[in-house]
């Protein structure tokens, strides 16, 4: 019986059928990037807001004040008498009732000196110039509540983490396309509920759930694309990352055109329902079907692929070799039970964590520059495009390991240099930091590809999901690490990023090379790949030793 890779080669490893499926599933990356980075626009801090004095609404109606006049009566005395207060987080400790004069509402405070006005902390009485422009103004995430905005992004990352575990496992057990479609449905429904959440608690709950389902769409579509192409075409996994970058570049345009956060949230959520149409055009992964002992169904899909590619399978292809590995529930123990799997898993988990932590840290650091938010965000996405192009230019020529290791090491060195560059050369400091971001972006994109290639079909989706969950953990930690350490010394976070990235660069060089090698079907295949890598390493070392005697 022929193997799956032999059948795939005859049906076409990257023909018209795979190109169509690839293009359709790549749109998932665009929508996922919208959600991943949307907090920048959903959580914009309003330019103008102040704390309203109790009774001000009724007094304004009685006196016929405009909102600007009310603001002047509320904030102007603070600006004149208390230099440290602008009326945003504090207000005058008074109450306006029916006895207050319209012409001089602050008469009762006249017995206080200008610098000693009675003040109190503001609690949920804020007034915004544009009340529905962001979740900050919608849910009063200002002053003492400002930390809740960071919480909303942390909750989203926790959703990604939960999705990696639960839906990664489900995709290995119940099928790639089923979980993909259910995830798209869930992400769309939760996104709509988030847009109309009546309070911040409901917002957080369904933002978490949207993160769970969104991670399911992203990881599962990546695995499907990887499993239906030949070993020489698996580099298209890098191209999927370019669609993620494309989404980063498109999002500021959407945010610029849509004035409210609810509109932005709907714009980035509703496209998930369009992906449900893929039920009729994207098949189940034949590799997965073989691991579930469904050889006939897999062969039927392969005949369909061959037909669309303008080819036909040989008559003797009546069966395909089915994995002899027993299909069972995936668990973390399966990923660390054997030496090769254990080494791959631990290194990849560390690589995911380091890539996410360093990437998000550098993005946030470069983002603290002011200026035009929409333009800055667009440029930050454009910076990532050369990373994918560099990978495409090198990865099939020299393999995965070397670019993977070098990109991490370069990122670490760039962070270290940036930390010690003088502040009076800002252009050089920014340039080196940008180089670090370019390098860590390369590492981030390569880890997706390598992670997929180093796990057997029976554990691939679960393995990729589990390892990438460390990416989400890094995303949760990054803002706290950046701002806490920066409070001690502004450049201290860069030192931490540097150490993590350089160590990662050295560790990934211990992974086996997967260039031009068929995807492993079983754990035994992974161990053979690892043992082959070790033997090659010992052989090279022996040759070096022999040459030293010569």
Image: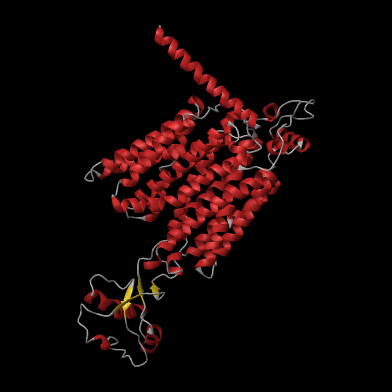
Percent x, y of residue 165: 59, 48
Q: Nearer the viewer, residue 9 or 400?
A: 400
Q: Indicate the quadrant where residue 544 lies.
A: top left
Residue at 79% in and 26% down: 315
Classify 6 as above or below 356: above
Q: Could you tell me which quadrant the N terminus lies in?
A: top right
Residue at 51% in and 40% down: 349
Please tell me how many numbered marks the rendered image carries.
0
Residue at 45% in and 37% down: 442
Percent x, y of residue 243: 52, 44
Relative to residue 50, is residue 252 drawn left or right? right
Q: Could one spot residue 50 in this view of the protein? A: yes
Percent x, y of residue 390: 44, 33
Q: Colour scheme of this structure image?
A: secondary structure
Residue furthest toward the bottom?
A: 99
Q: Could one spot residue 281 in this view of the protein? A: no
Q: Could you tell me which quadrant the C terminus lies in?
A: top left
Q: Indicate the quadrant where residue 224 lies.
A: top right
Classify 55 as above or below 470: below
Q: Nearer the viewer, residue 201 or 27?
A: 201
Relative to residue 128, is residue 85 drawn left or right? left
Residue at 26% in and 85% down: 109
Classify 72 as above or below 342: below
Classify 109 as above or below 236: below
Residue furthest toward the top?
A: 550
Percent x, y of residue 491: 30, 46
């Amino acid at each position: 019986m022929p193997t799956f890779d032999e059948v795939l080669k005859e049906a076409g490893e990257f023909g018209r059928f795979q190109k169509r499926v690839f293009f359709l599933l790549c749109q998932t990356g665009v929508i996922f990037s919208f959600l991943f980075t949307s907090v920048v626009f959903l959580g914009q801090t309003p330019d103008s807001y102040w704390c309203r004095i109790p009774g001000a609404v009724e007094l304004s109606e009685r006196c016929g004040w405009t909102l600007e006049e009310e603001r002047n009566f509320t904030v102007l005395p603070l600006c004149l008498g208390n230099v440290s207060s602008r009326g945003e987080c504090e207000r005058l400790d008074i109450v306006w009732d029916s006895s207050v004069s319209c012409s001089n509402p602050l008469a009762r405070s006249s017995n206080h000196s200008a610098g000693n006005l009675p003040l109190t902390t503001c609690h949920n009485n804020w007034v915004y110039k544009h009340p529905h422009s962001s979740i900050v103004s919608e849910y009063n995430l200002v002053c003492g509540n400002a930390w809740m905005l960071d919480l909303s992004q942390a909750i989203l990352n926790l959703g990604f983490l939960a999705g990696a575990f639960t839906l990664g496992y489900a995709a290995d057990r119940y099928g790639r396309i089923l979980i993909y479609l259910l995830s798209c449905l869930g992400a769309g429904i939760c996104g709509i509920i988030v847009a109309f959440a009546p309070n911040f608690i409901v917002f957080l709950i369904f933002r978490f759930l949207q993160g769970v389902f969104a991670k399911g769409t992203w990881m599962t579509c990546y695995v499907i694309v990887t499993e239906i192409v030949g070993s020489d075409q698996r580099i298209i996994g890098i191209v999927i990352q370019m669609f993620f970058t494309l989404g980063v570049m498109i999002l500021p345009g959407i945010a610029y055109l849509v004035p409210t956060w609810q509109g932005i949230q709907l714009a980035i959520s509703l496209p998930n329902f369009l992906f449900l149409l893929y039920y009729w055009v994207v098949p189940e992964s034949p590799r997965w079907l073989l691991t579930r002992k469904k050889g006939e169904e897999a062969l039927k899909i392969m005949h369909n692929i061959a037909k669309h590619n303008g080819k036909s399978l040989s008559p003797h292809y009546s069966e395909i070799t089915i994995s002899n590995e027993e299909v069972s529930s995936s668990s973390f123990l399966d990923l660390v039970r054997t030496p090769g799997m254990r080494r791959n898993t631990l290194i990849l988990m560390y690589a995911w964590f380091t890539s996410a932590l360093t990437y998000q840290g550098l993005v946030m650091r470069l983002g603290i520059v002011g200026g035009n938010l929409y333009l800055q965000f667009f440029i930050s996405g454009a910076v990532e495009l050369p990373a994918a192009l560099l990978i495409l230019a090198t990865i099939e020529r020299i393999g995965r390991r070397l670019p993977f290791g070098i990109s991490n090491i370069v990122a670490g060195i760039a962070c270290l240099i940036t930390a010690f560059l003088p502040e009076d050369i800002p252009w050089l400091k920014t340039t080196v930091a940008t180089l670090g971001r370019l390098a860590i972006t390369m590492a981030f994109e390569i880890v997706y590809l390598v992670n997929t290639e180093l796990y057997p079909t029976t554990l691939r989706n679960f393995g990729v999901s589990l390892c990438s969950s460390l990416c989400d953990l890094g995303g949760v930690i990054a803002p706290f690490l950046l701002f806490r350490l920066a409070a001690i010394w502004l450049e201290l976070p860069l030192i931490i990023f540097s150490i993590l990235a350089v160590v990662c660069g050295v560790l990934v060089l211990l992974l086996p090379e997967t260039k031009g090698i068929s995807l492993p079907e079983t754990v035994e295949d992974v161990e053979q790949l690892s043992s082959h890598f070790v033997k090659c390493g010992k052989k090279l070392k022996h040759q070096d030793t022999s040459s030293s005697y010569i």
